[in-house]
Image (cartoon, helix red, strand yellow):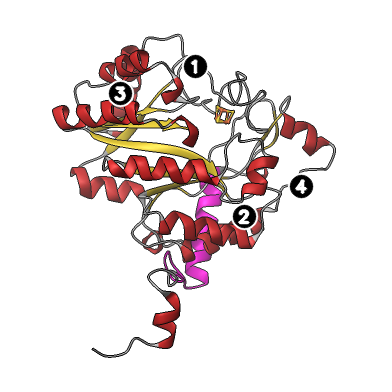
Amino acid sequence: MTPDISRYNIYSEYLKKKYGGKVYKLPVNLPGTCPNRDGTLGYGGCIFCDEAGAGFQCLPNTMEIKKQIEENREYFKKRFNAQKFIVYFQAFTNTYLPLSAFMENIKNACLDDVVGISVSTRPDCINDKYLDFLLELKEKSGLNIDIELGLQTVNYHTLEKINRGHSLAEFIDAVLRIHQRGFCICAHLILNLPWDGPVDVVENAKIISALGIRYVKLHSLYVVAGTRLGELYKRGEAPIPSMDQYVDSVVLFLEHLDPQIVIQRLVGKGPEENVLFSNWGSSWWKIKHTIESELAERDTRQGNRFNYLNGRALTVRGMPEL
Ligand code: SF4
């Protein structure tokens, strides 16, 4: 079946409409760590996290931030004819830096052709002082500011299993604080966690929709050698669902998701080196293509089963006429 990209709300199309041209994200890699690795909240980090802190596609973190932006900007301009950019603070936990260092880095990112800043962090590293600085910057510069929150799953039993170091409550608290300042949120979710099933996939979609999250990035779990997940995987204690199951999960997720939410990614690009498992040995774009074809085959789309908010029982029963 031919894939049909009109069946879900695609980020690139959304950006084109919003900014009137091609907009690309420029990843920035800062030296840093994470409270789930350095002992503040835990040691060892999430069981899937390798030393790169989930930022393997970035330039080296020893490179000055302005240089990283300029180098990436030139590349995207030449390769994709990009016109405007969103600086993406990707690796590690960017709001875990001291406030002064965080402010300095963000100010350094306000360069020509930059229309937005996207800050990736953990839900337990959202603090009013950092958000107030971002709000002031937004008001002065007019830049769009988004916060990306790693959640991975709303199943708090699985959050414990993957050693996230936070539960669902911290995510909800972060969302409420960010929304108070009017910033949009992108939530990261992994839809093939060995300990989650279809019920969790649906609940992921429902909670993200109920909280008014603006963007979603879906990932498939990859397994890097030397991580705790790698050990579990080798012992057969972390069976990864099949690719067909992943495709089913994404379709199910999209069907339950608010159709207004913008999908930044249907599947992640796994690292190429030192991996025990990554995207079923397939390429990310083939998996994306399969999901889009499956949506067309089943004649379904994002939001097809988005019918559970605003007093579901009342709408099922039938609202009385006024
Ligand atoms: S929150 Fe991110 S950087 Fe921290 S341990 Fe987990 S994956 Fe690694």
**Secondary structure found at label 1:** loop
Relative to the observer, which residue lies in front, 101 or 118? Answer: 101
Q: Which mark is residue 76?
A: none
Label 1 or label 2, whichever lies nearer to me, is 1
Beta carbon at label 1 within 8 Å of ligand 1: no
Residue that carries the numbered disc 1 in the rendered image? 32
Q: Residues within 10 Å of mark 1 (few under 14, many from 20)?
A: some
Q: Are marks 4 and 2 in contact (CB under 8 Å)?
A: no
- Does residue 196 lie above or below 227 as drawn? below
CA distance for labels 1 and 3: 23 Å
- The numbered mark, 4 or 2, whose residue comes first in the sequence reads 4
Quarter of the render that holds ligand 1:
top right
Q: Which residues are drawn in magenta?
A: 284-305
Q: Position of residue 51 (x, y in %)?
A: 61, 20
Residue that carries the numbered disc 4 in the rendered image? 239
Q: Residue furthest bottom?
A: 321
Q: Position of residue 46 (x, y in %)?
A: 63, 32
- The numbered mark, 1 or 3, whose residue comes first in the sequence reads 1
Q: Amino acid at mark 3?
A: Arg
Relative to the observer, which residue lies in front, 43 or 306? Answer: 43
CA distance for labels 1 and 4: 31 Å
Q: Is residue 176 left or right of residue 55?
A: left
Residue that carries the numbered disc 2 in the rendered image? 246
- Does residue 312 lie above or below 134 as drawn? below
Residue occupying image coordinates x 83% and y 42%: 236
Relative to the observer, which residue lies in front, 298 or 119? Answer: 119
Q: Is residue 36 left or right of residue 21?
A: right
Q: Residues within 10 Å of mark 3 (few under 14, many from 20)?
A: many
Q: Amino acid at mark 4?
A: Pro
Q: Which mark is residue 73?
A: 3
CA distance for labels 2 and 3: 33 Å
Q: Amino acid at mark 1?
A: Gly
